[in-house]
Image (cartoon, grey):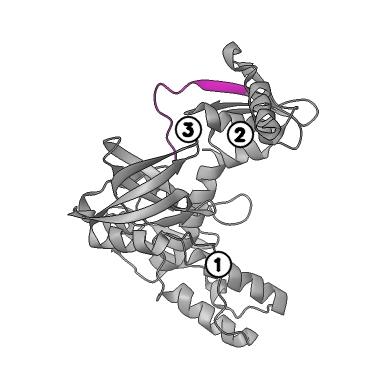
Amino acid sequence: MSRPEAEHQLQRVLAMIPWLASRPGVHKDEVAARFRITRDELERDLGLIMMVGVPPYTPGDYINVYAEGDTVELWLADYFTRPLQLSPSEGLALLAGGRALLAVEGSDPEGPLATALVKLEDALGMSEVVVEFGAPAELAELRRAASAGERVEIDYWSAGRDEVTTRRIDPGPPFFALGRWYSDAYCHLRDEQRMFRVDRIRALRATGERFDPDAAPVPEVLYAPRPGDPRVTLELPAGASWVAESFPAESVEDLPGGGQRVVVAVSEPAWLDRILLRVGTGARVVDPPELRAAGRLAALRVLARYRT
């Protein structure tokens, strides 16, 4: 699992724990539908929850899960009921983290986490602490259209091709992951499901057409390379580990001196150009040979724009 996918799973699991704890015996299909995951993904999440604890990470240190059959039972260890002795800074950090979790797909805005945060606000003497995620301009309208089953037309900027296209989509409920808002939608231009970053929607218009919101498939990952996408091997200098941490890397090998050799799928050349420009001269394309000059050529194109 890549670093971005692991972060997405961790956010989901943290939101799932209080929801499950307040609903003993909930059916697995209901859990999967609420958090927009498959049954297999749910089983992996439950397995991860069982291993939360202290070395040697045996099941049930902090959280007990019984998930045989089609239902889930989750309960917390007894010492979670003891009052916490928090400093003001620790309380504020806990409050901010809890507010951030409420933005995760599937979190219950009226559930036990929300009510606990209200009590923490009172204890800290703070009112209405809000964690802002820089909500994109079209988020509210997209969320409304997804809930009502209204097909919309969007002007969408593709980072991979560096172009804006107009397309009709059947939007799925927006969800927050990896620091961004996304919508898994059926794209009528491409005639397939596509993941859209909401902040890349330049304009949104109603079409007057409708779709069945319950028929949309559940997304499994934020990004899935196409079968024909080329794989590119990069050698990165020390300090550029953010590449493998921020994007799905198929393999990562540490090099002497703190660098890394990574293999990534490249759907669009413009995406690779931006990575190489951000890393700078220390980045090198090892394979395929025809892309070894990609970074230098991208830099020359940027310089040409400045000259004009």
Which label sits on residue 132? Answer: 1
Q: Secondary structure at mark 1?
A: loop
The residue lying furthest to the front in this view is 308
Q: Secondary structure at mark 3?
A: loop
Three-letter amino acid code at the position of disc 3: Arg
Which label sits on residue 161? Answer: 3
Tell me if residue 261 can be seen. Answer: no
**Residue 229 location in percent, x, y?**
45, 23
**Residue 75 location in percent, x, y?**
44, 67
Q: Residue at x 68, y 77 (%)?
A: 86
**Residue 308 location in percent, x, y?**
66, 32
Three-letter amino acid code at the position of disc 1: Glu
- The part of the image, by quadrant, that contains residue 141 is bottom left
Residue identifier under label 2: 274
- How far is disc 1 from disc 2 in space, using C-alphas? 27 Å
- Crowding at dot 1, Cα within 10 Å, few <14 / some 14-19 / many 20+, comes out as few
Q: Are marks 2 and 3 in contact (CB under 8 Å)?
A: no
